[in-house]
Image (cartoon, rainbow, N blue to C red):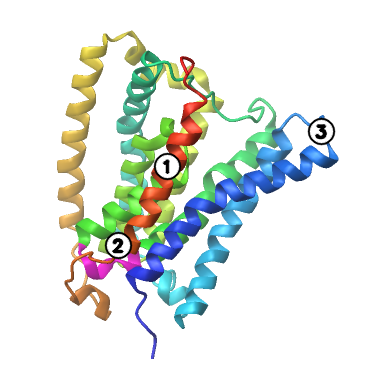
Amino acid sequence: MEKDITPNTSSRGALLGILVPIAVALLIGMIFLVFTPDNDGVIVNVLSSLFTEIAFVLIAFYLSKQNGTNFWVMTKANIKPKSKHIYLAIGLSIACIFLFLPIISLWENLLSTIGYKIQDGLVYDLTNPMWIIYSIFAVALLPAICEETLFRGVVLNGTRSLGIKFCVLYSALCFSLMHLNIQQLPYTFILGIICGLFCYHTHSLWPSVIFHFINNSFVLLLMCVPALQNALFGWWSALPIWAAILIALVLVVVAYFVIRFVFTHINNAPPTDKQETKSTSPKDKKLYIPLIVGAVLVIILSISRFGAL
């Protein structure tokens, strides 16, 4: 008989998921600094991202062994999604681009006004076909599978017993902090919420993977074709700040009601595992350790990018 994955397992998975990116980057950076001090940093970035994503799956696999649970059952990767869930993930991922990009633009403008140096896009040359192919794999496909496996497959599923609001918001916040980038916080948090809702309501990992993959692919497409991005969102930069804030708030409210309507009409069968029939409160303080560690790391790593400091 399979054991239930516990909130304690979720907190360990979240903490490891937040610490792994910076640990991998430091390790690979030091290795290249010793052996190839003149490298331009691109190879370090490539290897760091690849090893980080692979590590996420290894963490999930390790936790499944520690918990005495089958990896595929624990992450709900064994459940085949229904066709309507796949179509919903595809349609909603494209629609949400029109929510994400204005919010990203507004957030970056707000950060710029307080002296934060905005990071440019990818370090890869997106005019080179080989780098485009690699980016689809490393920026869209691999993160969709590996990050969803850990943050929805482990972190969310392990906190299902604490209720939908807690498990979705907790996994989304851990997912957002994992990126260790204040510039990406709002976007990744909203992305995490939607992926969490997919995972929770469909009882399968794959709709959230599909949503994550298509969303990242579409963003990558806009980066490869600046003319398309300007055509769709160029008007945004011309707006005064008050109008941008107002439109962003309206988009968030509209998105909330649309997503709420969508997920209340998925009409899945009742939960089949014991976790979803419990109702407890998040009293274990260990659950908050990943959030505190992640917030501290984001603050530390952001300080250097404020020009006034």
Does 118 lie within the magenta span? no
Task: Give whichever of discs 3 and 1 has the lower sequence position.
Answer: 3
| Amino acid type of the residue that numbered disc 3 sits on in the rendered structure | Pro
Tell me what residue is drawn at x 24 percent, y 70 percent: 161
Whole-Å distance between the Cαs marked 2 and 1? Answer: 17 Å
- Alpha-carbon distance for marks 3 and 1? 29 Å
- Residue type at tag 2: Lys
Residue 128 lies, in percent from the top left, at 70, 28
What residue is shown with label 2?
285
Label whose residue precedes the other's in the sequence (2 or 3) = 3
Quadrant location, the N terminus:
bottom left
Is residue 70 depicted above or below 129 in this figure? below
Give the class, few, some or many, for how many residues have Cα within 10 Å of label 3's Cα (few <14, many ≥20).
Answer: few
Whether tag 3 and tag 1 are in contact, CB under 8 A, the answer is no
Disc 2 to disc 3, how far (Cα)? 43 Å
Q: Which residue is mark 1?
A: 296
Circle 3 residue? 37
Left-right relation of 111 to 228: left
Q: Earlier in the sequence, mark 2 or mark 1?
A: 2
Q: Is residue 308 left or right of residue 172?
A: right
Residue at the spot 32% in from the left edge and 37% down from the top edge: 96
Looking at the rendered structure, the number of numbered marks drawn on it comes to: 3
Secondary structure that dominates the magenta span: helix
Q: Nearer the viewer, residue 133 or 146?
A: 146
Tell me the magenta residue range.
156-163
Dot 2: element: helix
Q: Amino acid at mark 1?
A: Val
Residue at x 20% of width, y 56% of height: 165
